[in-house]
Image: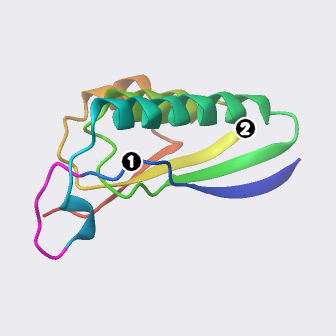
Amino acid sequence: MSELTLLYRGSLISCNYGCDYCPFAKRRETRAEMERDRGEVERFVAWVKGEGQAHRLRILFTPWGEGLVRPWYQQALAELSRLEHVARVAIQTNLACGLSWTEDADRDALALWATYH
């Protein structure tokens, strides 16, 4: 089984912080845009599940905004971390959320790339 590293960047473009220096804090998404992002994340998780025979995966979510304030990102990371063929799943985050959702994750496979500010 070959190893493959994936960088996932969906259509998420908003952040819960309003830092002047950051381009991601400049707008809020509409409900339709959030639903689109949720659907993209769910389709990506389904695709990863189907890759179990072909690849051992390392996945980094690098959204153009803050993903972990949205439950579907928390669920996706927890679910992906439990898959045998996922060696690592990580997300870039500002840690502006609780971490109780990690109780459902395989913490040996889950990583958080935190920019705490």
- Crowding around mark 2 (Cα neighbors within 10 Å: few <14, some 14 to 19, many 20+) is many
Element on which disc 2 rests: loop
Query: What residue span does the magenta drawing correspond to?
Result: 15-21
- Crowding around mark 1 (Cα neighbors within 10 Å: few <14, some 14 to 19, many 20+) is many
Residue 58 appears in the figure: yes
The three-letter code of the residue at mark 1 reads Leu
The magenta stretch spans residue 17: yes
Q: Position of residue 115 (x, y in %)?
A: 25, 64
Residue situated in front as seen by the camera: 9 or 112: 9
Instruction: Report the residue at 21% width, 54% height from top.
Output: 27
Instruction: Report the residue at 42% width, 51% height from top.
Output: 91
Q: Mark 2 = which residue? A: 85
Q: Position of residue 3 (x, y in %)?
A: 79, 55
The three-letter code of the residue at mark 2 reads His
Residue 106 appears in the figure: no
**On screen, residue 103 above or below 59:** above
**On screen, residue 104 above or below 10:** above
Residue situated in front as seen by the camera: 3 or 34: 34
Q: Is residue 56 left or right of residue 114?
A: right
Q: Which mark is residue 49?
A: none
Q: Is residue 8 left or right of residue 90?
A: right
**On screen, residue 43 above or below 114:** above
Q: In the image, which is nearer the foreground, mark 1 or mark 2?
A: 1
Q: Mark 1 = which residue? A: 12
Would you say the magenta stretch is mainly helix, strand or loop? Answer: loop
Q: Is residue 39 left or right of residue 25?
A: right
Mark sitting earlier along the chain (1/2): 1
Element on which disc 1 rests: loop
The magenta stretch spans residue 49: no
Q: Quadrant of residue 104 in the image? A: top left
